[in-house]
């Protein structure tokens, strides 16, 4: 090995320390300082190698020499810190003397990051429901056909499958079927919740969804949803209306009015869509761009959970009823902030993202 074999160990450690300290005194730039650190204290540095060589000694010797070695290490580290400060100060003084740096200027503050606008609005939506007693749960983005379609009353061959073409995972089971897909909505997680719990249930499910889709200003092939579900004895359409009305007021202002109209979703009966009166023109229309002159803005779909969905997860539809709803947080953010193209959300253009 190194010095360890040439001299008695105490002497070799002392000598190494003395040499190192002397050498350090002659160093006045940061680059050589680093070379010095590597030479003595680095992983293959001289002191490190001596300390490592101790393992070949017997226990008594090892203990004494180890203590000595560690003391030397601490000493060198202390000197290194001190010398670093000295050199930095000298460099700073020299630069200040040459007027190349004005040390009295305030420092540049680091630019803090921020949450993505989708994350912000998803949290705002979930918070509104948490305030009404809902829990937030998340589920997998890769799903089985069974949860994404079958359990939601969309069997093989159902025309509603055409509305939700998606990306299928390249996997076949023994029967030759391709049952794994990127979820087209967050509803499969609600099916999972119902399957594993008994009512009462009140959950909101935020998360990312996928569709096989040509993109345009209002369509992305990946996007978020926030869906909600409440199941218990005696839940009625009045509970749906009351809950969603309160939600609309929390997100879009106390003075909002809401409108429900019939709509179709295979997993609910009856199904509705909910609109709020336009906050841009206060429902006046009159050429308003936000509501396209109608005075109303559609913000989500909802309905009473279909009895077949309840039965499918093992609930008695005679005993339990429930309501469910789903919305697109990007659409909510677009309405709230006047964003005209959904593709802006995921184009990673900081000029857009920094506005939120
Ligand atoms: C929309 C409409 C909706 C649901 C989602 C749901 C989930 C289960 C059972 C019943 Cl497990 N319903 N979800 C119901 C109605 C509408 O979403 O336009 N979303 C963006």
Image (tube, rainbow, N blue to C red):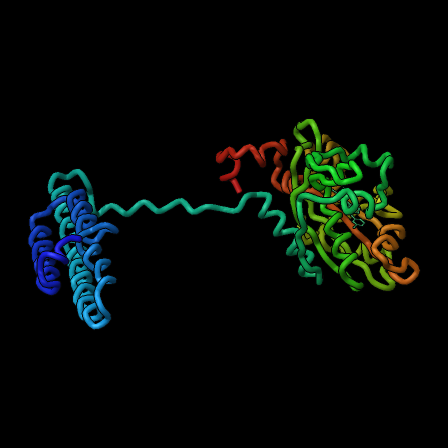
- Which one is nearer the viewer's eye here, 293 or 272? 272
Question: Is residue 157 visible in the rendered structure shown here?
Answer: yes
* Residue shown at 25% from the left, 51% from the top: 43
Left or right: residue 12 compared with residue 49: left
Query: With respect to residue 205, does 75 lie above or below?
Result: below
Query: With respect to residue 235, does 269 lie above or below?
Result: above
- Which one is nearer the viewer's eye here, 163 or 36? 36
* Residue shown at 61% from the left, 51% from the top: 123
**Percent coordinates x, y for residue 36 in the rendering:** 16, 48
* Residue shown at 32% from the left, 45% from the top: 108
Left or right: residue 22 compared with residue 44: left
* Residue shown at 77% from the left, 35% from the top: 164
**Percent coordinates x, y for residue 94 in the rendering:** 12, 43
- Which image quadrant is residue 293 in? top right
**Percent coordinates x, y for residue 225 in the rendering:** 69, 44
Left or right: residue 27 compared with residue 272: left
């Amino acid at each position: 090995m190194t010095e360890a074999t040439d001299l008695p160990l105490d002497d070799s450690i002392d000598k190494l320390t003395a040499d190192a300290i002397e050498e350090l005194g002659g160093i006045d730039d940061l680059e050589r300082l680093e070379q010095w650190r590597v030479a003595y204290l680095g992983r293959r540095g001289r002191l490190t190698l001596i300390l490592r060589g101790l393992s070949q000694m017997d226990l008594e010797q090892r203990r004494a020499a180890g203590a000595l070695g560690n003391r030397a290490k601490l000493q060198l580290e202390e000197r290194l810190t001190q010398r670093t400060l000295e050199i930095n100060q000298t460099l700073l003084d020299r630069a200040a003397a040459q007027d190349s740096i004005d040390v009295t200027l305030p420092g540049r503050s680091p630019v803090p990051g921020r949450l993505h606008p989708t994350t912000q609005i998803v949290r705002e939506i979930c918070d509104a429901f948490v305030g009404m007693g809902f829990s937030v749960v998340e589920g997998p983005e890769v799903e089985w056909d069974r949860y994404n379609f079958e359990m939601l009353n969309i069997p093989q061959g159902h025309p509603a499958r055409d509305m939700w073409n998606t990306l299928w995972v390249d996997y076949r089971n023994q029967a030759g079927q391709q049952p794994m897909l990127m979820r087209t909505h967050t509803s499969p997680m609600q099916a999972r919740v119902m399957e594993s719990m008994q009512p009462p249930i009140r959950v909101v499910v935020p998360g990312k969804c996928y569709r096989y889709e040509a993109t345009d200003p209002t369509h992305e092939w990946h996007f978020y949803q926030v869906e909600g579900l409440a199941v218990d004895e005696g839940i009625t359409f009045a509970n749906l209306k009351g809950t969603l009305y309160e939600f609309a007021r929390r997100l879009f202002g106390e003075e909002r009015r809401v409108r429900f109209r019939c709509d179709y979703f295979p997993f609910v009966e009856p199904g509705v869509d909910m609109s709020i009166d336009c906050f841009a023109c206060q429902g006046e229309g009159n050429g308003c761009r936000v509501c396209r002159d109608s005075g109303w803005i559609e913000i989500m779909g909802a309905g009473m959970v279909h009895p077949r969905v309840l039965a499918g997860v093992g609930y008695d539809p005679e005993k339990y009823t429930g309501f469910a709803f789903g919305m697109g947080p990007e659409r909510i953010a677009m309405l709230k902030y006047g964003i005209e193209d959904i593709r802006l959300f995921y184009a990673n253009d900081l000029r857009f993202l920094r506005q939120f």
